[in-house]
Amino acid sequence: MTLSHTRHAVRLAEQHFGDNLAVAFVGGSYPRGTAKPTSDIDVFVLLKQGDRPSETAFANALRALHEEAGLHFDHCGEIFDTASLGMLLSFTEQTVASMPAIQRSACYQADCPLSVFRKGDIVFKFLDDPKLHTLDPGQVLPALEKRAAAYFAKWPMPRVQEHKKALALPEGSEQAGLARTWAQREATPQWIDTPTGVGLERWFGADLTTRAGAVAAEAVIHTPSPSPSACPIPLTNGARRRVFAAQCLARSTPLEAIS
């Protein structure tokens, strides 16, 4: 792996998004200096407007770049439109303020792919961490970096989850079923249609404002569920269950019951 590959990843964003591109950079292990020979290239892309066909073409081109370079590939980076990113960051801030216990739950400690909070925290890390090959023609990034710095000053999250890869989802639950479906799609062209693909607003965009209201409406939750690797939703009842469900992509509680 050379800098030419990471630079090419950002050039792919330029080629596919053109004037719709607000921000692009490489984050993760390469700018931190911790990349391994086959580490994936973590690309962050912010668009002025969502554009599913261009996002899909970029994601496939990025995957091809990884395959040609002999790199590990499991997602196409973080691709957002401006509105969805703003909504996700606000939701993440609201969730940790209303539920500090989530920092010690499986949602975060076991790196659960169903947790909207976990996704928001990952994005905040992207914005706070070192970067390579930054494109920011409209100077959008400094305000986002300042917001990320303020988030971690208030909520200093551990960068290494103690129970990563030990996630236990209840057998037969909606959570387990959804995670299994996404895992089955990863090796097929349907990998695009998962939260590691494109169109992230489909998974946590339109109703995040409603869910944030559900999170904020309950008493602050300081005590986590007993196991930091087991899904907290089945272990909780009443308000605690509603709050955890409000930030889960697989909602055990219907949204209309949450709101």
Image (cartoon, rainbow, N blue to C red):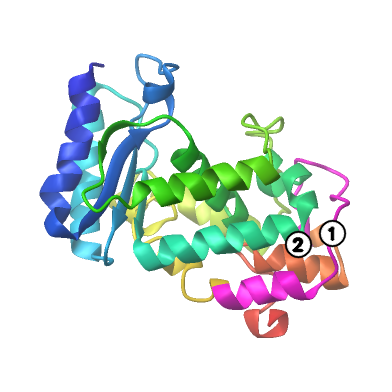
Q: Residues within 10 Å of mark 2 (few under 14, many from 20)?
A: many
> What residue is rendered at 65% in x and 69% in y?
251
Instruction: Report whether residue 254 is seen.
Output: yes
Task: Tell me the element at label 1.
Answer: loop
Task: Tell me the element at label 2.
Answer: helix
Which residue is at the front of the view, 117 or 129? 129
Which residue is at the front of the view, 138 or 78? 138
Q: Position of residue 213 (x, y in %)?
A: 67, 76
- 23 shown above or below 215: above
CA gap, disc 2 to disc 1? Answer: 6 Å
Picture quadrant of residue 173: bottom right
- The residue identified by callout 2 is 98
The mark nearer the N terminus, 2 or 1, is 2
Picture quadrant of residue 39: top left
Q: Position of residue 10 (x, y in %)?
A: 21, 38
- Count of residue discs: 2
Q: Would residue 175 appear left or right of 119 to someone viewing this image?
A: right
Residue 53 colored in magenta in the image: no
Residue 217 colored in magenta in the image: yes
> What residue is rendered at 65% in x and 85% in y?
256
- The residue identified by callout 1 is 221
The quarter of the image holding the N terminus is: top left
Q: Amino acid at mark 1?
A: Ile
Give the extent of the magenta segment: 209-233
**Residue 82 — which label?**
none
Q: Amino acid at mark 2?
A: Ser
Q: Position of residue 158 (x, y in %)?
A: 67, 33
Q: Would residue 56 appear left or right of 210 to someone viewing this image?
A: left
- 60 shown above or below 116: above
- 94 shown above or below 106: below
Which residue is at the front of the view, 131 or 186? 131
